[in-house]
Image (cartoon, helix red, strand yellow):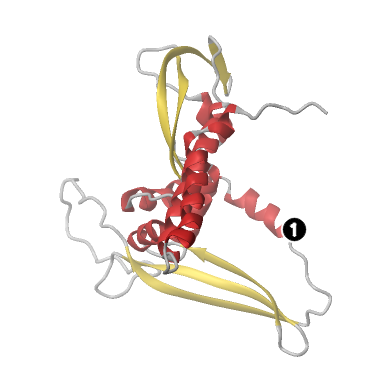
Amino acid sequence: MPVSPMSDVLQTPSLWRLAQCVRQHQDQWQQSEAPPDLERFERAFHDQVMAVDRDLLADALSRYAVAADDVTVAGVSSRRSLESTQTSLSAAGPITVSRHLYRPAGRSTKSIGPLELRAGIVQGLWTPTAARQGACVMAHLTSRESAMLCEELGGMQPSVSTLDRLPKTLSARFEAHREGWEGDVRARETVPAEAVVLAVSLDGVMAPRAKSAPDQRAPTAPTEPEAPAAGDSPGKRNDREAGCGTVTLYDAEGKRLSTVRYGRMPE
């Protein structure tokens, strides 16, 4: 039976270093009377696995590149302008690939990267899986705590500011399609046959917002002070209420069957 040759990507130096890491750990059991340090091996092994991960992902990502003379995106034709490297943040860390950029006609137009569009790169930086993981940790922790957790896990290590920008970008895109996407989610929801109780909970918390720019209009005659807007707290006109709620189903014994959580910032 013919044997297929091993792909070049599976012969990367990182894969051989991974094998060497395992071999050295095994040799330590024969060369020393004391057992080797498991934590040190676990961290070294994880680092080598991440290196292999990055090499394989870089090879996979490079296949999304386009080398045509021109491309059409959203009905707009663009000509190939230059070739450059692009570093993306994967769940295993940064990966760098070469790709072509394309520029629409015009003096002040912005170049586009078909590789990023085809691969679903978020914010021009995050791979889809990395963005999903980054959004998950940011939903539970602050940006600084999220950065510390990523560093401890030993995969991607985004900066505090990079993590802080991610949910803002995702939220803006979600808001543009929110009603349709929420409708699709609700259409897939089912009510278990054993559900007999529906509990709806509403709550909110006053959250400070950045102050708006001062009014630069010419002063007018004094008028009666405006009544506080809904959600304002006395003396803190810059606070607004962030709302949250849950919809929970219970069975006849009081066992919780499912919970749908909602949250909306005042913006």
Q: Quadrant of the N terminus?
A: top right
For the residue pair 36 and 197, the one nearer the viewer reads as 36
Which residue shows up at 35% across the image and 60% down it?
Answer: 148
Residue at image position (72%, 27%) is 4
Residue at position x 44%, y 11% in the image = 105
Would you name the residue on which mark 1 appears? 188
Q: Dot 1 surroundings within 10 Å: few (below 14), some, or many (20 or more)?
A: few
Residue 19, given in percent of the width and then of the height, sits at 52, 45
Quadrant for the C terminus, please: bottom left
- Residue 26: x and y, percent? 51, 56
Eyeballing the image, is 7 above or below 191?
above
Q: Which residue lies furthest to the top in this view?
A: 69
Callout 1: SS = loop
Res. 205 image quadrant: bottom left
How far across and how far down the image is residue 181, in percent?
Answer: 64, 50
Farthest residue, direction bottom: 253
**Kind of residue at badge 1:** Arg
Left or right of 64 in this view: 43? left
Q: Is residue 211 above or below residue 64?
A: below
